[in-house]
Each structure stands twice: as C-alpha cells, then as structure tokens.
Amino acid sequence: MRKIFFTLFLMLLTTASVFAQAQIGLRAGASWATISDDVDMPSGVERPWRPGFTLGVASSFNIGQVFAIAPELNFSQRGNRTENLLDANGETFDSENRYNYLEIPVLFRLSFGDVLGGYINAGPTLSYWLGGRTDTEDINFSEIDEEKRWEIGGAIGGGVKLDTGAGSFLLDLRYSRGFTNTFYRDLTGDYDFKHQLISTSVIFLFPSVR
C-alpha cells in the first residue's frame, strides 16, 4: 500500500508538470492533534491537543501569476490526549494515543504580492495509517483490513511567501480534518471519531525547473 501511495504522488507530479512551471522542495514543522467525537465525557476530563511534528516533500505547479496546484507527500503525527480519567479503583490517569500517517494533500493556492506576499490554499487530503500505540499498549494493525487504513479529509490554510533567487520560502499555517470515521463502526457504534490537526511549518521550494 505504501508503494501505491508513492505512485499516486509521482503521478500527480508528472501530470501537473506537463502544463505548469514546477517547483519542488521540503516541508517541516510542528503540529497539534486531537480526535473529535460526540462522546459525552465525565466532568473533569480534559482533552488537550497532542503535540507532534510533520515532515515531507512539497511542490508547486504555477499556472499564471497567482494560481498554483501544490501536492505534498507528508509524514504526519496524529492522535489525542485524555487527562483525568478514572480507573476501576477511582484513581485518575492520563491516556495518550500516538498515530503515524502518510498523507497526500492536493492544495489549490492563490497568491498575492510580489517578492514578499501572502497566499491562501485549500484542498482534499488522502491519508494512510502507518501504525501507532497508546501509552500503555501497542496497537496491532495486522488484524485490520487494509482499506480501513485510508482516510479522506480536507485542509485549509495560508501563510507568508518570500521569493528569492535561491528559491521560495513559505511560512505555512494549516488546519486539517478527516471526513471519514477513524475506526470501524463495530468498534465505535453510532459515534464518529475524526482526526483534527493544526500545523505550522516552513516550506522551501527550489527555483522553477521550467
């Protein structure tokens, strides 16, 4: 499945580069994750966002002066934290779930300004669950069907862009959310569990190759 993921990303790069000026580079930054649900938690239970990081390959295929298509291939840490839970003995404890994903966002970007300017972008995301663990036990994904590892979602954000002779620097702020349920219905019943992620990152794009 990982080979399929890389193949999809390469197909996006190849298709877009046929009709656009292409830039490719690196993306790295910090993230804060949680899992949204409609479960009523007991009083006193807190759910702070879990810190993590994101790292990947970014690209931009410029169509004209202001519009671009920007596919990425990212490694992304997700999950959630739950604090002040009660065990069977009435003692409080904290729980942390750590999930690792590969994701392909395909962002449609509008830029404004010249050498120093800004941009906004939004688009769909396709993510693949690599694995994960909690603070008390490993999660064994070998018993989970492959197709459930996939997640469809969306991302929206913007930032500041600086164009130099050596390339383009972007300071990016982004909100991402899953549209599909993270877990199987036979595990969650009528509840929906969906990933949410806020990330801030630095993107460097090398000069256009065309």
Image (cartoon, rainbow, N blue to C red):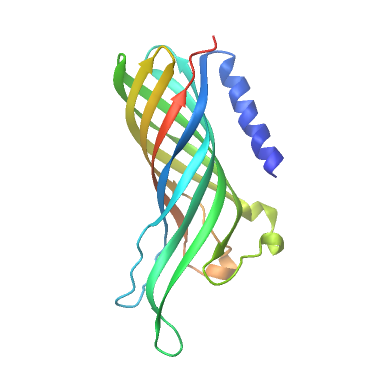
Judge from the rendering whether residue 80 lies leftward or rightward of residue 159; answer left or right.
right
Q: Which residue lies most toward the top here?
A: 210
Q: Position of residue 69 (x, y in %)?
A: 47, 24
Q: Is residue 162 above or below residue 209?
A: below
The percent coordinates of residue 97 (x first, y second) are 50, 63
Give percent across and percent down for residue 110: 36, 23
Q: Residue at x 33, y 69 (%)?
A: 46
Q: Nearer the viewer, residue 119 or 137?
A: 137
Q: Quadrant of residue 203?
A: top left
Q: Residue furthest bottom?
A: 89
Q: In this orientation, which residue lies closer to the viewer: 111 or 84?
A: 84
Residue 48 vs 5, above or below: the answer is below
In depth, the one of 109 and 28 nearer the eye is 28
Whole-percent x, y for residue 115 in the image: 31, 14
Query: In the picture provided, is 7 more to the left or to the right than 188?
Result: right
In the displayed structure image, the side of residue 44 where residue 82 appears, left or right = right
Q: How many marks?
A: 0
Residue placed at 59% from the left, 14% from the top? 18
The C terminus sits in image quarter: top right
Please report the residue visible at 50 percent of the width from the left and 13 percent of the height from the top: 208
Which of the image's four quarters has the N terminus? top right
Extreme front residue here? 166
On screen, residue 127 above or below 8: below
